[in-house]
Protein backbone atom coordinates (compact mmCIF):
# COMPACT_ATOMS: atom_id res chain seq x y z
CA UNK A 1 0.00 0.00 0.00
CA UNK A 2 2.86 2.31 0.96
CA UNK A 3 4.25 1.95 -2.57
CA UNK A 4 0.97 1.56 -4.44
CA UNK A 5 -0.47 4.99 -3.57
CA UNK A 6 2.51 6.92 -5.02
CA UNK A 7 2.43 4.65 -8.09
CA UNK A 8 -1.27 5.34 -8.66
CA UNK A 9 -0.72 9.09 -8.15
CA UNK A 10 2.18 9.07 -10.62
CA UNK A 11 0.06 7.16 -13.15
CA UNK A 12 -2.96 9.49 -12.91
CA UNK A 13 -0.84 12.65 -12.95
CA UNK A 14 1.28 11.44 -15.87
CA UNK A 15 -1.74 10.43 -17.96
CA UNK A 16 -3.49 13.76 -17.19
CA UNK A 17 -0.46 15.78 -18.30
CA UNK A 18 -0.15 13.79 -21.53
CA UNK A 19 -3.89 14.08 -22.32
CA UNK A 20 -3.91 17.83 -21.62
CA UNK A 21 -1.23 18.31 -24.29
CA UNK A 22 -3.54 16.77 -26.91
CA UNK A 23 -6.87 18.09 -25.53
CA UNK A 24 -6.11 21.57 -24.15
CA UNK A 25 -9.75 22.17 -23.11
CA UNK A 26 -11.81 21.80 -19.96
CA UNK A 27 -11.58 19.88 -17.69
CA UNK A 28 -7.99 18.95 -18.63
CA UNK A 29 -6.79 22.55 -19.00
CA UNK A 30 -8.03 23.33 -15.47
CA UNK A 31 -6.44 20.21 -14.04
CA UNK A 32 -3.09 20.94 -15.65
CA UNK A 33 -3.22 24.52 -14.33
CA UNK A 34 -3.70 23.20 -10.81
CA UNK A 35 -0.91 20.65 -11.26
CA UNK A 36 1.46 23.35 -12.53
CA UNK A 37 0.65 25.55 -9.53
CA UNK A 38 1.35 22.61 -7.22
CA UNK A 39 4.63 21.97 -9.01
CA UNK A 40 5.77 25.56 -8.47
CA UNK A 41 4.85 25.43 -4.77
CA UNK A 42 6.59 22.09 -4.26
CA UNK A 43 9.67 23.38 -6.13
CA UNK A 44 9.81 26.30 -3.71
CA UNK A 45 9.86 23.91 -0.79
CA UNK A 46 12.54 21.84 -2.52
CA UNK A 47 14.91 24.82 -2.18
CA UNK A 48 14.30 24.86 1.57
CA UNK A 49 14.82 21.10 1.69
CA UNK A 50 18.10 21.49 -0.20
CA UNK A 51 19.33 24.08 2.28
CA UNK A 52 18.49 21.87 5.25
CA UNK A 53 20.19 18.93 3.55
CA UNK A 54 23.28 21.04 2.80
CA UNK A 55 23.47 22.14 6.43
CA UNK A 56 23.03 18.62 7.81
CA UNK A 57 25.47 16.88 5.47
CA UNK A 58 28.17 19.50 6.07
CA UNK A 59 27.66 19.35 9.82
CA UNK A 60 27.89 15.54 9.82
CA UNK A 61 31.19 15.64 7.89
CA UNK A 62 32.66 18.21 10.25
CA UNK A 63 31.59 16.19 13.30
CA UNK A 64 33.12 13.02 11.82
CA UNK A 65 36.34 14.96 11.04
CA UNK A 66 36.31 13.63 7.50
CA UNK A 67 39.25 14.39 5.24
CA UNK A 68 39.16 18.08 4.29
CA UNK A 69 36.57 18.81 7.02
CA UNK A 70 37.76 22.42 7.20
CA UNK A 71 36.43 23.01 3.66
CA UNK A 72 33.00 21.88 4.82
CA UNK A 73 33.37 24.20 7.81
CA UNK A 74 34.19 27.11 5.50
CA UNK A 75 31.12 26.27 3.42
CA UNK A 76 28.92 26.09 6.49
CA UNK A 77 30.23 29.39 7.89
CA UNK A 78 29.62 31.09 4.52
CA UNK A 79 26.13 29.63 4.38
CA UNK A 80 25.32 30.81 7.92
CA UNK A 81 26.80 34.27 7.29
CA UNK A 82 24.75 34.87 4.15
CA UNK A 83 21.61 33.47 5.77
CA UNK A 84 22.16 35.51 8.95
CA UNK A 85 22.85 38.78 7.14
CA UNK A 86 19.91 38.22 4.82
CA UNK A 87 17.55 37.54 7.72
CA UNK A 88 18.84 40.43 9.85
CA UNK A 89 19.05 43.28 7.36
CA UNK A 90 17.37 41.89 4.28
CA UNK A 91 18.44 42.33 0.67
CA UNK A 92 18.30 45.40 -1.57
CA UNK A 93 14.84 46.95 -1.05
CA UNK A 94 13.58 44.31 1.39
CA UNK A 95 14.10 44.91 5.07
CA UNK A 96 15.08 42.14 7.45
CA UNK A 97 14.22 41.34 11.06
CA UNK A 98 16.42 44.22 12.26
CA UNK A 99 15.14 46.63 9.58
CA UNK A 100 17.30 48.04 6.80
CA UNK A 101 20.37 48.48 9.04
CA UNK A 102 21.18 52.02 7.93
CA UNK A 103 24.25 52.21 10.21
CA UNK A 104 25.74 49.07 8.71
CA UNK A 105 24.80 50.29 5.22
CA UNK A 106 26.55 53.61 5.83
CA UNK A 107 29.65 51.77 6.98
CA UNK A 108 29.78 49.21 4.15
CA UNK A 109 28.13 51.26 1.42
CA UNK A 110 25.65 48.45 0.88
CA UNK A 111 23.61 45.93 2.82
CA UNK A 112 25.86 43.17 4.22
CA UNK A 113 24.15 40.46 2.15
CA UNK A 114 24.47 42.46 -1.07
CA UNK A 115 28.01 43.50 -0.16
CA UNK A 116 29.09 39.87 0.28
CA UNK A 117 27.25 38.82 -2.89
CA UNK A 118 28.88 41.54 -4.99
CA UNK A 119 32.39 41.54 -3.57
CA UNK A 120 32.86 37.93 -2.42
CA UNK A 121 30.47 35.52 -4.11
CA UNK A 122 30.53 37.04 -7.60
CA UNK A 123 34.33 37.36 -7.98
CA UNK A 124 34.94 33.96 -6.38
CA UNK A 125 32.37 32.27 -8.58
CA UNK A 126 33.69 33.89 -11.78
CA UNK A 127 37.29 33.08 -10.77
CA UNK A 128 36.50 29.43 -10.21
CA UNK A 129 34.92 29.15 -13.67
CA UNK A 130 37.78 31.09 -15.28
CA UNK A 131 40.33 28.65 -13.84
CA UNK A 132 39.00 26.16 -16.39
CA UNK A 133 40.99 28.03 -19.04
CA UNK A 134 44.25 26.91 -17.39
CA UNK A 135 43.16 23.28 -17.29
CA UNK A 136 41.95 23.43 -20.90
CA UNK A 137 45.32 24.84 -22.00
CA UNK A 138 47.17 22.15 -20.06
CA UNK A 139 44.89 19.39 -21.37
CA UNK A 140 45.26 20.68 -24.96
CA UNK A 141 49.03 20.39 -24.64
CA UNK A 142 49.05 16.89 -23.13
CA UNK A 143 45.99 15.14 -24.59
CA UNK A 144 45.18 16.62 -28.01
CA UNK A 145 47.54 14.29 -29.85
CA UNK A 146 47.09 12.93 -33.40
CA UNK A 147 46.99 9.15 -33.07
CA UNK A 148 44.46 8.05 -35.70
CA UNK A 149 42.39 9.28 -38.66
CA UNK A 150 39.54 10.28 -36.32
CA UNK A 151 41.79 12.26 -34.01
CA UNK A 152 43.33 13.94 -37.08
CA UNK A 153 39.86 14.95 -38.26
CA UNK A 154 38.99 16.24 -34.81
CA UNK A 155 42.21 18.22 -34.67
CA UNK A 156 41.67 19.92 -38.06
CA UNK A 157 38.07 20.81 -37.17
CA UNK A 158 39.10 22.12 -33.76
CA UNK A 159 41.85 24.29 -35.22
CA UNK A 160 39.46 25.81 -37.80
CA UNK A 161 36.75 26.48 -35.20
CA UNK A 162 39.19 27.90 -32.63
CA UNK A 163 40.80 30.19 -35.21
CA UNK A 164 37.43 31.16 -36.65
CA UNK A 165 36.25 32.20 -33.20
CA UNK A 166 39.10 34.66 -32.68
CA UNK A 167 39.50 38.17 -34.05
CA UNK A 168 42.92 37.06 -35.34
CA UNK A 169 41.39 34.23 -37.44
CA UNK A 170 39.35 36.68 -39.49
CA UNK A 171 42.43 38.78 -40.18
CA UNK A 172 44.42 35.74 -41.34
CA UNK A 173 42.18 35.06 -44.36
CA UNK A 174 40.66 38.49 -44.93
CA UNK A 175 42.76 38.83 -48.11
CA UNK A 176 40.83 36.04 -49.87
CA UNK A 177 38.89 37.18 -52.98
CA UNK A 178 35.07 37.22 -52.96
CA UNK A 179 34.71 33.91 -54.88
CA UNK A 180 36.82 32.15 -52.22
CA UNK A 181 34.99 33.64 -49.22
CA UNK A 182 33.79 30.20 -48.19
CA UNK A 183 37.38 29.44 -47.11
CA UNK A 184 37.51 32.58 -44.97
CA UNK A 185 38.13 31.16 -41.46
CA UNK A 186 35.07 32.66 -39.68
CA UNK A 187 32.84 31.47 -42.58
CA UNK A 188 34.40 28.02 -42.49
CA UNK A 189 33.93 27.90 -38.72
CA UNK A 190 30.26 28.94 -39.09
CA UNK A 191 29.77 26.27 -41.77
CA UNK A 192 31.12 23.57 -39.43
CA UNK A 193 28.86 24.79 -36.62
CA UNK A 194 25.80 25.12 -38.82
CA UNK A 195 25.92 21.85 -40.75
CA UNK A 196 28.06 18.99 -39.37
CA UNK A 197 27.62 20.19 -35.77
CA UNK A 198 23.88 20.83 -36.05
CA UNK A 199 23.30 17.50 -37.78
CA UNK A 200 25.09 15.63 -35.01
CA UNK A 201 23.38 17.69 -32.32
CA UNK A 202 19.95 16.99 -33.84
CA UNK A 203 20.68 13.26 -33.86
CA UNK A 204 21.67 13.46 -30.19
CA UNK A 205 18.58 15.53 -29.34
CA UNK A 206 16.19 13.16 -31.11
CA UNK A 207 17.80 10.13 -29.44
CA UNK A 208 17.64 11.81 -26.05
CA UNK A 209 13.99 12.78 -26.63
CA UNK A 210 13.11 9.18 -27.50
CA UNK A 211 14.94 8.06 -24.38
CA UNK A 212 13.02 10.55 -22.26
CA UNK A 213 9.71 9.36 -23.72
CA UNK A 214 10.69 5.77 -22.92
CA UNK A 215 11.75 6.45 -19.35
CA UNK A 216 8.69 8.68 -18.75
CA UNK A 217 6.41 5.87 -19.91
CA UNK A 218 8.22 3.48 -17.58
CA UNK A 219 7.60 5.84 -14.66
CA UNK A 220 3.93 6.48 -15.58
CA UNK A 221 3.25 2.76 -15.96
CA UNK A 222 5.03 1.95 -12.71
CA UNK A 223 7.80 -0.14 -14.30
CA UNK A 224 10.52 2.24 -13.16
CA UNK A 225 10.19 2.72 -9.39
CA UNK A 226 13.59 3.93 -8.30
CA UNK A 227 12.22 7.46 -7.66
CA UNK A 228 10.29 5.97 -4.74
CA UNK A 229 13.50 4.98 -3.00
CA UNK A 230 14.40 1.45 -1.97
CA UNK A 231 16.06 -1.20 -4.10
CA UNK A 232 13.61 -1.86 -6.94
CA UNK B 1 51.18 8.63 -5.96
CA UNK B 2 53.27 11.63 -6.95
CA UNK B 3 53.12 13.29 -10.35
CA UNK B 4 56.05 13.20 -12.77
CA UNK B 5 58.27 16.26 -11.95
CA UNK B 6 58.67 17.03 -15.69
CA UNK B 7 54.94 16.94 -16.22
CA UNK B 8 54.43 19.23 -13.20
CA UNK B 9 56.99 21.69 -14.53
CA UNK B 10 55.40 21.63 -18.00
CA UNK B 11 51.99 22.29 -16.48
CA UNK B 12 53.35 25.25 -14.52
CA UNK B 13 54.95 26.71 -17.63
CA UNK B 14 51.64 26.31 -19.52
CA UNK B 15 49.75 28.05 -16.67
CA UNK B 16 52.29 30.87 -16.49
CA UNK B 17 52.29 31.49 -20.26
CA UNK B 18 48.50 31.51 -20.37
CA UNK B 19 48.36 33.94 -17.45
CA UNK B 20 50.76 36.30 -19.25
CA UNK B 21 48.89 35.88 -22.56
CA UNK B 22 45.58 36.84 -20.95
CA UNK B 23 46.91 39.65 -18.74
CA UNK B 24 48.93 41.67 -21.27
CA UNK B 25 46.08 42.33 -23.78
CA UNK B 26 43.81 43.30 -20.87
CA UNK B 27 46.33 45.93 -19.75
CA UNK B 28 47.39 46.99 -23.25
CA UNK B 29 44.40 46.34 -25.59
CA UNK B 30 45.32 45.49 -29.18
CA UNK B 31 42.04 46.61 -30.72
CA UNK B 32 41.45 43.71 -33.12
CA UNK B 33 38.15 43.99 -34.97
CA UNK B 34 35.57 41.23 -34.70
CA UNK B 35 33.58 40.14 -37.74
CA UNK B 36 29.82 39.90 -37.20
CA UNK B 37 28.34 36.43 -37.68
CA UNK B 38 24.89 35.65 -39.07
CA UNK B 39 23.66 34.39 -35.71
CA UNK B 40 24.46 37.66 -33.91
CA UNK B 41 22.94 39.65 -36.76
CA UNK B 42 19.68 37.68 -36.48
CA UNK B 43 19.39 38.45 -32.77
CA UNK B 44 20.12 42.11 -33.48
CA UNK B 45 17.49 42.19 -36.24
CA UNK B 46 14.79 40.85 -33.92
CA UNK B 47 15.40 43.61 -31.36
CA UNK B 48 15.76 46.19 -34.13
CA UNK B 49 12.47 45.15 -35.80
CA UNK B 50 10.39 45.01 -32.61
CA UNK B 51 8.19 48.14 -32.43
CA UNK B 52 8.79 50.96 -29.96
CA UNK B 53 7.04 50.69 -26.59
CA UNK B 54 6.73 46.89 -26.89
CA UNK B 55 7.14 45.05 -23.61
CA UNK B 56 9.93 42.50 -23.90
CA UNK B 57 11.31 39.90 -21.50
CA UNK B 58 14.98 39.59 -20.60
CA UNK B 59 15.40 36.34 -18.72
CA UNK B 60 18.62 36.17 -16.70
CA UNK B 61 19.12 32.42 -16.52
CA UNK B 62 22.68 32.33 -15.23
CA UNK B 63 24.72 32.98 -12.14
CA UNK B 64 27.99 34.83 -11.47
CA UNK B 65 30.15 31.88 -12.60
CA UNK B 66 29.37 32.61 -16.26
CA UNK B 67 28.98 36.38 -15.97
CA UNK B 68 32.26 36.98 -17.82
CA UNK B 69 30.61 35.75 -21.01
CA UNK B 70 26.96 36.54 -20.42
CA UNK B 71 26.96 39.89 -18.62
CA UNK B 72 28.47 41.78 -21.62
CA UNK B 73 25.73 40.27 -23.81
CA UNK B 74 23.04 41.32 -21.36
CA UNK B 75 24.43 44.85 -21.18
CA UNK B 76 24.73 45.21 -24.96
CA UNK B 77 21.26 43.80 -25.69
CA UNK B 78 19.70 45.87 -22.91
CA UNK B 79 21.40 48.95 -24.35
CA UNK B 80 19.93 48.11 -27.75
CA UNK B 81 16.41 47.49 -26.35
CA UNK B 82 16.49 50.79 -24.43
CA UNK B 83 17.72 52.64 -27.52
CA UNK B 84 14.67 51.24 -29.39
CA UNK B 85 12.46 52.52 -26.55
CA UNK B 86 11.32 49.00 -25.65
CA UNK B 87 10.06 48.31 -22.14
CA UNK B 88 12.09 45.61 -20.48
CA UNK B 89 10.73 43.15 -17.98
CA UNK B 90 13.64 41.32 -16.36
CA UNK B 91 13.14 37.98 -14.69
CA UNK B 92 15.26 34.99 -13.74
CA UNK B 93 14.89 31.23 -13.86
CA UNK B 94 18.12 30.95 -11.87
CA UNK B 95 18.21 32.19 -8.24
CA UNK B 96 21.09 34.64 -8.70
CA UNK B 97 19.79 35.90 -12.03
CA UNK B 98 17.81 38.69 -10.38
CA UNK B 99 21.02 40.29 -9.08
CA UNK B 100 22.61 39.90 -12.51
CA UNK B 101 19.63 41.79 -13.95
CA UNK B 102 20.07 44.61 -11.42
CA UNK B 103 23.71 44.94 -12.42
CA UNK B 104 22.86 45.01 -16.13
CA UNK B 105 20.20 47.68 -15.54
CA UNK B 106 22.71 49.69 -13.51
CA UNK B 107 25.12 49.64 -16.45
CA UNK B 108 22.45 50.44 -19.06
CA UNK B 109 21.09 53.33 -16.99
CA UNK B 110 24.47 55.06 -17.25
CA UNK B 111 23.65 55.59 -20.95
CA UNK B 112 19.89 56.05 -20.44
CA UNK B 113 19.44 57.95 -17.15
CA UNK B 114 15.95 59.08 -18.20
CA UNK B 115 14.55 55.52 -18.01
CA UNK B 116 12.21 55.05 -15.05
CA UNK B 117 11.60 51.93 -12.99
CA UNK B 118 8.08 50.59 -13.47
CA UNK B 119 7.57 52.64 -16.62
CA UNK B 120 10.51 51.63 -18.84
CA UNK B 121 11.89 48.63 -17.02
CA UNK B 122 11.05 46.34 -14.16
CA UNK B 123 12.69 43.42 -12.37
CA UNK B 124 10.18 40.77 -11.30
CA UNK B 125 12.91 38.57 -9.86
CA UNK B 126 13.47 34.84 -9.62
CA UNK B 127 10.79 32.27 -10.26
CA UNK B 128 11.26 28.64 -9.33
CA UNK B 129 10.13 25.64 -11.45
CA UNK B 130 11.78 26.42 -14.82
CA UNK B 131 9.67 25.34 -17.79
CA UNK B 132 6.50 25.05 -15.69
CA UNK B 133 6.84 28.71 -14.69
CA UNK B 134 7.09 29.65 -18.39
CA UNK B 135 4.04 27.52 -19.23
CA UNK B 136 2.12 29.29 -16.46
CA UNK B 137 3.23 32.68 -17.84
CA UNK B 138 1.51 31.64 -21.06
CA UNK B 139 -1.77 31.53 -19.12
CA UNK B 140 -1.45 34.36 -16.64
CA UNK B 141 1.66 36.44 -15.96
CA UNK B 142 0.23 38.14 -12.88
CA UNK B 143 -0.31 34.77 -11.20
CA UNK B 144 3.32 33.79 -11.72
CA UNK B 145 4.68 37.18 -10.63
CA UNK B 146 2.22 38.65 -8.10
CA UNK B 147 4.84 41.27 -7.15
CA UNK B 148 8.13 42.54 -8.54
CA UNK B 149 11.53 42.33 -6.86
CA UNK B 150 10.69 45.42 -4.75
CA UNK B 151 7.34 44.07 -3.59
CA UNK B 152 5.19 46.26 -5.86
CA UNK B 153 2.03 44.50 -7.02
CA UNK B 154 1.89 43.42 -10.68
CA UNK B 155 -1.25 45.47 -11.34
CA UNK B 156 0.48 48.60 -10.04
CA UNK B 157 3.41 48.31 -12.45
CA UNK B 158 2.56 50.79 -15.18
CA UNK B 159 4.38 49.09 -18.06
CA UNK B 160 2.78 45.70 -17.32
CA UNK B 161 -0.83 46.89 -17.13
CA UNK B 162 -1.74 45.53 -20.57
CA UNK B 163 0.42 42.45 -20.32
CA UNK B 164 -1.66 39.41 -19.45
CA UNK B 165 0.15 36.47 -21.04
CA UNK B 166 3.27 35.64 -23.02
CA UNK B 167 1.35 36.42 -26.23
CA UNK B 168 1.50 40.13 -25.31
CA UNK B 169 5.30 40.09 -25.19
CA UNK B 170 7.37 41.44 -28.12
CA UNK B 171 10.10 38.88 -27.73
CA UNK B 172 11.92 36.88 -25.08
CA UNK B 173 15.67 37.21 -24.71
CA UNK B 174 17.06 34.41 -22.57
CA UNK B 175 20.65 34.73 -21.43
CA UNK B 176 21.31 31.26 -20.22
CA UNK B 177 24.16 29.08 -19.13
CA UNK B 178 22.24 25.83 -18.73
CA UNK B 179 18.91 24.41 -17.63
CA UNK B 180 16.43 26.06 -17.28
CA UNK B 181 17.25 28.45 -20.07
CA UNK B 182 16.97 28.98 -23.81
CA UNK B 183 15.75 25.45 -24.57
CA UNK B 184 12.84 25.79 -22.12
CA UNK B 185 11.92 29.21 -23.54
CA UNK B 186 11.87 27.76 -27.07
CA UNK B 187 9.67 24.84 -26.02
CA UNK B 188 7.25 26.69 -23.76
CA UNK B 189 7.14 30.22 -25.21
CA UNK B 190 8.07 30.00 -28.92
CA UNK B 191 6.55 26.64 -29.80
CA UNK B 192 3.47 26.90 -27.58
CA UNK B 193 2.54 30.61 -27.89
CA UNK B 194 4.50 31.85 -30.90
CA UNK B 195 6.44 34.44 -28.89
CA UNK B 196 9.76 35.10 -30.67
CA UNK B 197 12.77 33.94 -28.67
CA UNK B 198 16.39 34.97 -28.97
CA UNK B 199 19.24 34.59 -26.55
CA UNK B 200 22.82 34.21 -25.59
CA UNK B 201 24.79 31.45 -24.00
CA UNK B 202 28.33 30.41 -23.15
CA UNK B 203 30.65 29.38 -25.98
CA UNK B 204 30.65 25.75 -24.83
CA UNK B 205 26.84 25.55 -24.75
CA UNK B 206 26.24 27.24 -28.11
CA UNK B 207 26.75 24.16 -30.36
CA UNK B 208 23.94 22.34 -28.53
CA UNK B 209 21.49 25.18 -29.18
CA UNK B 210 22.33 25.95 -32.81
CA UNK B 211 19.80 23.38 -34.18
CA UNK B 212 17.05 25.69 -32.86
CA UNK B 213 18.24 28.46 -35.19
CA UNK B 214 16.39 27.07 -38.18
CA UNK B 215 13.93 27.96 -40.93
CA UNK B 216 11.02 27.81 -38.44
CA UNK B 217 12.89 30.43 -36.40
CA UNK B 218 12.46 28.57 -33.16
CA UNK B 219 15.35 30.75 -32.07
CA UNK B 220 16.00 34.15 -33.67
CA UNK B 221 19.77 33.99 -33.74
CA UNK B 222 22.06 33.10 -30.89
CA UNK B 223 24.99 34.77 -29.19
CA UNK B 224 27.59 32.19 -28.22
CA UNK B 225 30.34 33.32 -25.86
CA UNK B 226 32.39 36.46 -25.54
CA UNK B 227 33.04 36.72 -29.28
CA UNK B 228 29.33 36.99 -30.04
CA UNK B 229 28.98 39.58 -27.27
CA UNK B 230 31.70 41.65 -28.92
CA UNK B 231 29.96 41.16 -32.31
CA UNK B 232 26.79 42.57 -30.77
CA UNK B 233 28.72 45.54 -29.42
CA UNK B 234 30.01 46.11 -32.95
CA UNK B 235 26.42 46.01 -34.26
CA UNK B 236 25.23 48.64 -31.79
CA UNK B 237 28.41 50.65 -32.34
CA UNK B 238 29.51 50.48 -28.72
CA UNK B 239 32.88 49.57 -27.24
CA UNK B 240 31.94 47.55 -24.20
CA UNK B 241 33.59 45.01 -21.93
CA UNK B 242 33.33 42.19 -24.49
CA UNK B 243 35.32 44.11 -27.13
CA UNK B 244 38.05 44.82 -24.58
CA UNK B 245 38.17 41.22 -23.35
CA UNK B 246 38.09 39.74 -26.85
CA UNK B 247 41.77 40.56 -27.46
CA UNK B 248 42.74 38.51 -24.41
CA UNK B 249 40.54 35.62 -25.50
CA UNK B 250 41.95 35.66 -29.03
CA UNK B 251 45.53 35.56 -27.72
CA UNK B 252 44.61 32.76 -25.30
CA UNK B 253 43.09 30.74 -28.17
CA UNK B 254 46.21 31.24 -30.27
CA UNK B 255 48.37 30.12 -27.38
CA UNK B 256 46.24 27.00 -26.95
CA UNK B 257 46.78 26.21 -30.65
CA UNK B 258 50.53 26.60 -30.13
CA UNK B 259 50.31 24.25 -27.13
CA UNK B 260 48.48 21.68 -29.26
CA UNK B 261 51.20 21.90 -31.93
CA UNK B 262 53.99 21.61 -29.33
CA UNK B 263 52.24 18.67 -27.65
CA UNK B 264 52.06 16.85 -30.99
CA UNK B 265 55.72 17.53 -31.78
CA UNK B 266 56.66 16.19 -28.34
CA UNK B 267 54.51 13.09 -28.86
CA UNK B 268 56.02 12.56 -32.32
CA UNK B 269 59.60 12.66 -30.97
CA UNK B 270 58.70 10.41 -28.05
CA UNK B 271 57.24 7.86 -30.48
CA UNK B 272 60.33 8.09 -32.68
CA UNK B 273 62.62 7.55 -29.67
CA UNK B 274 60.62 4.52 -28.57
CA UNK B 275 60.93 2.97 -32.06
CA UNK B 276 64.67 3.62 -32.07
Image (tube, rainbow, N blue to C red):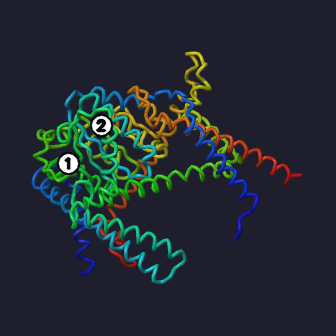
The residue where tag 1 is placed is B137
Residue at (61% x, 24% y) in the render: A173
Which residue is rendered at x = 22% and y = 27% of the image?
B51
Mark 2 or 1 closer to N-term?
Answer: 2
- Residue A4 location, quadrant: bottom left
Q: Quadrant of residue A36?
A: bottom left
Q: Chain of mark 2?
A: B
Q: Nearer the viewer, mark 2 or mark 1?
A: 2
Is residue B127 visible in the rendered structure shown here? yes
Determine the CA span between mark 2 and mark 1.
Answer: 27 Å
* Horizontal and vertical percent position of residue A125: 45, 56
The spot of residue A6 in percent (x, y) is 25, 73
Residue B16 percent coordinates (x, y): 66, 49
Circle 1: is it few (<14), some (14-19), or many (20+) Cα within 10 Å? many
Residue shown at 71%/59% (left/top)?
B8
The residue that label 2 is drawn on is B109
**Left or right: residue B53 compared with residue B98:** left
The answer to whether residue A202 shows anywhere in this view is no
- Mark 1 secondary-structure assignment: helix
Q: Pick out the residue farthest to the bottom.
A: A64
Q: Which sits in the foreground, A206 or B31?
A: B31
Task: Identify the chain of the residue marked 1, using the numbered disc in the image.
Answer: B
Dots 2, 1 in contact, CB < 8 A? no
Q: Are marks 2 and 1 on the same chain?
A: yes
How crowded pointer 2 is (Cα within 10 Å; few <14, some 14-19, many 20+) is rated as some
Which numbered tag is attached to residue B8? none
Amino acid sequence: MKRNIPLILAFITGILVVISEFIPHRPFSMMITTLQDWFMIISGFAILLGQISLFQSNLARIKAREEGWYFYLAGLISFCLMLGFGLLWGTQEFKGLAGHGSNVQNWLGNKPFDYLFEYAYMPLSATLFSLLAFFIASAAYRAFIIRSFESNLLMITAVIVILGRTSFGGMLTSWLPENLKFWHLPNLSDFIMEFPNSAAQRAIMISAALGIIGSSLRIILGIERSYLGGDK
Amino acid sequence: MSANPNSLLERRIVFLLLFVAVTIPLIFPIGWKTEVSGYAKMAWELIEATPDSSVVIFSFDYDPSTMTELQPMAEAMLHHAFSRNQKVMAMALWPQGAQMADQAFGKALESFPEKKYGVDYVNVGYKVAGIVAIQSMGRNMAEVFPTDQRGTKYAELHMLKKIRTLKDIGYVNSLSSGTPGIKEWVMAARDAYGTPVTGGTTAVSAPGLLPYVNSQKQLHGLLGGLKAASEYETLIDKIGTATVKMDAQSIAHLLILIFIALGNIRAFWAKKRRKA
